[in-house]
């Protein structure tokens, strides 16, 4: 086999592999993590990891069912100040911050912390730690793009985000009409885990 023919065969193999790897999804499709794709950005967005590294992603998918209905975190006397933010791409970092924050004498678990419940969620295609509690802006995208579909399978219309509003409240999203409200971190709300890829 001559070098030109070998080169062409290798190029065909590489192109085939790249095409398979870069599968395109649209909002509403089943995602590779067995969730539902609810956001696509052609230019991509940064997702901030626990170790400070940044991963560039193009999609967000959401769990097909609620992960839990649970408090935001076990805050002693309904007070814990964890420096979380609202932006797209920040939900994963927020989740790590909530799980590792100071919570008084309470131990963080999936039964008392929305972020921990999302962090421990997994599917046959994903592992624990792949999923996270969405930030306020990520939750708003979920409402805008899949709100009625999520509400149809929800226990409650209120869903919790990983974004706090001050030391004693966090941001919630009402999926019946899109209203966002701050509410006590000790209050129970439903959560969906999301995943970036």
Image (cartoon, helix red, strand yellow):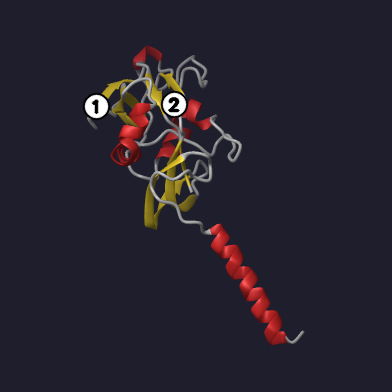
Residue occupying image coordinates x 54% and y 63%: 19
Taking 71 as reference, is 46 above or below it?
below
Mark toward the viewer: 1 or 2: 2
Q: How busy is the neighbourhood of tag 2: few (under 14 within 10 Å), some, or many (20 plus)?
A: some
Q: Is residue 161 visible?
A: no
User: Residue 115 bears which disc, if any?
Assistant: none
In the figure, residue 185 lies in which quadrant?
top left
Say which quadrant the N terminus sits in.
Answer: bottom right
Badge 1 or badge 2: first in the primary sequence: 2
Residue that label 1 marks: 181
Taking 82 as reference, is 125 above or below it?
below
Residue occupying image coordinates x 62% and y 73%: 12
Taking 20 as reference, is 52 above or below it?
above
Residue that label 2 marks: 66
Position of residue 57 measured from the top left corner of the image (x, y, whole percent): 45, 52
In the figure, is residue 174 to the left or right of 150?
left
SS class of the residue under badge 2? loop
């Amino acid at each position: 086999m001559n070098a030109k023919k070998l080169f062409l065969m290798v190029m065909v193999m590489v192109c085939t592999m790249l095409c398979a790897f870069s599968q395109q999804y649209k909002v509403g499709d089943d995602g590779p993590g067995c969730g539902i794709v609810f956001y696509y950005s052609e230019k991509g967005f940064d997702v901030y990891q626990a170790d400070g590294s940044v991963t560039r992603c193009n999609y967000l998918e959401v769990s097909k069912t609620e992960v839990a209905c649970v408090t935001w975190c076990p805050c002693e006397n309904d007070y814990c100040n964890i420096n979380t933010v609202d932006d797209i791409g920040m939900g994963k970092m927020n989740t790590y911050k909530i799980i590792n924050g100071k919570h008084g004498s309470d131990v963080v678990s999936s039964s008392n912390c929305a972020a921990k419940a999302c962090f421990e969620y997994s599917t046959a295609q994903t592992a624990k730690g792949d999923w996270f509690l969405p930030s306020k802006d990520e939750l708003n995208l979920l409402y805008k793009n899949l709100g009625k579909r999520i509400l149809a399978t929800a226990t409650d219309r209120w869903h919790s985000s990983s974004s706090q509003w001050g030391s004693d409240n966090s941001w919630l999203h009402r999926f019946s009409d899109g209203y966002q409200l701050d509410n006590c971190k000790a209050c129970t709300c439903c959560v969906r885990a999301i995943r970036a890829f």
